Every structure is written in structure tokens, then in C-alpha cells.
Image (tube, rainbow, N blue to C red):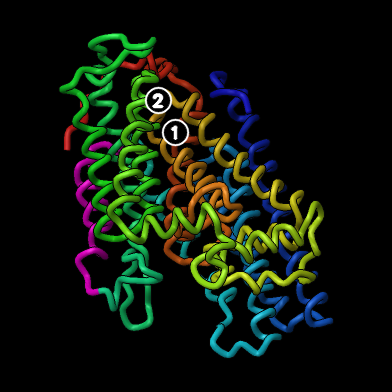
Amino acid sequence: MPGPVTDPRGAAAATPTRRGTEAAMLAFAVVLTTAAQAIVDLTVTGSLRPEMAMFSAWITALWIVAHLAVRRWASYADPLLLPAVALLVGLGLTVIHRLDLAAEMSGNTASREDAPVQLIWATLGVALFVAVLVIVRDHRALSRFAYTLALLGIVLLALPAVLPASISEVNGAKIWIRVAGFSIQPGEFAKICLVVFFAAYLVDKRDVLALASKKVAGLELPRGRDLGPVLLAWILSILVLVFERDLGSSLLLFGIFVVMLYIATERASWLFIGLTLFAGGALIAYQIFGHVRARVDTWLDPFAYIDGAGYQLVQSLFGLGTGGLFGAGLGGGRPDQVPIAKSDFIAAAVGEELGLFGLVAVIVVYLILVERGLRTSLVVRDAFGKLLAAGLAFAVAWQVFVVLGGVTGLLPLTGLTTPFLAYGGSSLVANFVLVALLVRISDAARRPATPHTPAVRLGEAPTEVVTP
């Protein structure tokens, strides 16, 4: 997409084009979702379920509302952000419905129908998406609440660790809050709060953190006194790993901070320091914590643990192998053989029924979403918006990479969920908020420039003092 339009007549002409592009892509996503659901029903049961008409109307209304909200409150936003999300959510609903039918056909009475629940979560997510667009009219206003959001993020992150295991622990990780049949994963919302804080803090301290003390092996290393922020982020990630036994959130938060630090300072030495701290932390965690050692050992040789911890990964690899290049077709595989396939291993279900081509197509949709977020970071005019958009986009990319790496055996399993695709209300709703912030920044980036808002590169942007 071109950069911000500076000519008012060009801007007026560009807005209807964006509206048409987004509407057409959303229509494509709705048609594809409906067709995929129909294929699943016909393949598995031989007929369309009675709820199909209601589902089609519901999903159509959902994206019409989201589209109208974007056109009303963010009319210059990138027209590909929302359709990419719609396509991922629609495919996720289809695969979850397919797994529901598999459980029903096998007589699994312990399993419930999760697709209708996920549709309700998607509706709540769209409602919050619209609310963010209405409330946050200028993304720069978030910088004023940076330290408040940091405190909120830390509280949300730490809350499950201090609660009794009976209401916070699932599969060995204390990352949930479960009360009266309702569950929430506060770490998903903590991620967004901390990204906003990281962006505001790094804009404020960018010049200091970019200073180098000496050059070693071609790397300009920062001063020792400036290592505090990255050490604090490292310690925070270790604490999450220790008290919540959550490898995924620990890896996600530290990776996001190090990459945002690199983007802010343009110093490759911060990446080197981050990788060194990560390697050291991983080695210490492997030696001290049994649950980390078990996950790494299972990752290295899952077939040695096929009767226990390795069963899930082995079944995932079998499913991906069965799918081959083109897959068994929607409804034609046995993705229900993988435990917890609806959430942790939904990518394995996609790979089995849509094949390598289908899984790569899903990855391409994620790449489009991330690329548009990074492009927004390049064209937005203020330094805070640049860092915030880059951090949010990288958060999605990093999470997808870690999850797919675990499903395919490239990385140890982390327990993270695939954004927008996997079953889980907390993840889905939080990621709708994330995309709403990207849409808001994209709208600001593509609005016609005024004489008082010249476009600048991040490296040339002046330091902005952010007050709590």
C-alpha cells in the first residue's frame, strides 16, 4: 500500500477505495468460512446442520459491524488488517466445529460443543474491537498511561501465581483464573499492557540506551549502567517461569522486549545481549526446574516418551505426515487423535486436513497481518506509534512462530495458543484488542499529513518525554 496521502483530493478518493477493498475481502472471508463449514457438515454427517443458516447470518453480521466501525472511526486504516483476522477466525471456527463433530461421532460424552462458545467469544472480541476504536481516538494518548498499564500488566501476569492451584493451574501451568465455570487467562491482556509500556519507556530512554561504551568483535556494546532495563525484563520472565511454570509467556515477553529495544536503538548488540541472557536462562531453567527439563527431553526425543508426555507431539507429527501436501480434506482426517487439538494443537488439525499447502496458506495470512502491522510502523509519524505498532506486530509473529515450532517439533512445547485460530476466549478477545490498536495506528499513519505532522524515520525522531 502507498504511504500517507498528502493531497486532500487524493485522500478523498482513497477512502472509498479502501472501503471497497476491505468490504470485498471481508465478503470473501465470510463466503470461505460458510463454504468450509458446509463441507465439514456434508463430509462428516452427510447433510447440513439446521444451525447453518443462523451461523452464516451471525458471522456475516459480525464482520459487517466491524467493517462499519472501521469505516466510521478509522476510515484511513489499512484495508487488509480486518479481513486477515476474519479469515483466521472463520477457519478456526470451522476446525473447532469439525473437532466437535469428531468427538460426537466417537461417542465422547466428556467433550462439549466448543464452536458455538468460540463464536460468542468472537462476538465479544468484535465488541471490544469497536470499543477500542471509539475510546482510543489517538494512540499517542496511551503513552500518558504507560506506567499505569505496566503496573496493571504485572498484576495480571502475577495474579495466577498467588492464587491457589485449584483455581489457577491447568496442565501444570498456573496461568488461569477459574471461578464458577468461567475461566480467563490474564497473561493475554498483560501482554498488550506491557507492549504499550515498553513502547513509551523506550521512546523516553532511546537516546540513553543507544549510547555505546566500547566496540567488541564489531559490536558496539552499551554502557554497563544501561543494562538495567533488559536485566529487569529477563528477571521478570524468569519469575514467570519459576512461579507459574509457564515457558510460553516467559519466552514471549522477553522476546518482545528485546526486539523492541533493538528497533528503538538500532543497536545489534542488544540482540546479542538478549540471546546471551536467553541462553543462560534456558540453561539454568533446564538444570533447576523439572518441568522445563521434561519438556526439553520430550522435544528432543518424543518417541521415547510416546506413552506419556510425548504422546501429544507424536500424534501431531503423525497427523501432519498423514496430511501430506494436499491434506485429507475437511472432515476426512482424524485430527481428534491429537489431545487438546482445539487449542494447543489446532495447527496440526489444519495440517492434517488441508495439507502442507493449506498450512502454508494460513501462515501467509499471518504474514500479511504482521507485514501490514510493520508497514504501519514504518509510515506512522510519531516515535511512540512506530514502536507500538512494531511491538504489536512482532508479538503476533513471535507467538505464531513459537506455537508452530512446538507443533512441528522445531521447538519445545510452550502452551501458547495460535492467535485467532485456536479455541480460547482470553486469547481471542485480547488479540482483537491488539488488532484494534493496530487499526487505530494505521489510521493515523495513512491520514493526510498536515504541516504540523511531518513524517519522520524512527532513527531521526526526537526524544519524547512520557509522563506517567
Mark positioned earlier in the residue sequence (2 or 1): 2
The front one of 155 and 269 is: 269
Image quarter hosting the C terminus: top left
Which residue is labeled 1 in the image?
390
Say which residue appears at 44% left-offset and 35% top-offset. Answer: 389
Q: Can you say whether 38 is above or below 326 in the image? A: below
Say which residue appears at 53% left-offset and 65% top-offset. Answer: 305
Describe the element under mark 2 as helix, strand or loop.
Answer: helix
- Indicate the amino acid at tag 1: Ala
Q: Position of residue 465 (x, y in %)?
A: 21, 25
Q: In the picture provided, is 131 more to the left or to the right than 419?
A: left
Q: Position of residue 342 (x, y in %)?
A: 57, 68
Q: Which residues are magenta?
A: 141-164
The front one of 166 and 82 is: 166
Q: Can you say whether 95 is above or below 88 in the image? A: below
Describe the element under mark 1 as helix, strand or loop.
Answer: helix
| Residues marked 2 and 1 touching at CB (< 8 Å) | yes
Task: Please identify the residue farthest to the front as the structure is shown.
Answer: 304
**Residue 291, magenta (yes or no):** no
C-alpha gap between disc 2 and disc 1? 8 Å
- Indicate the amino acid at tag 2: Ile
Say which residue appears at 54% left-offset and 38% top-offset. Answer: 77
Which residue is labeled 2 in the image?
263
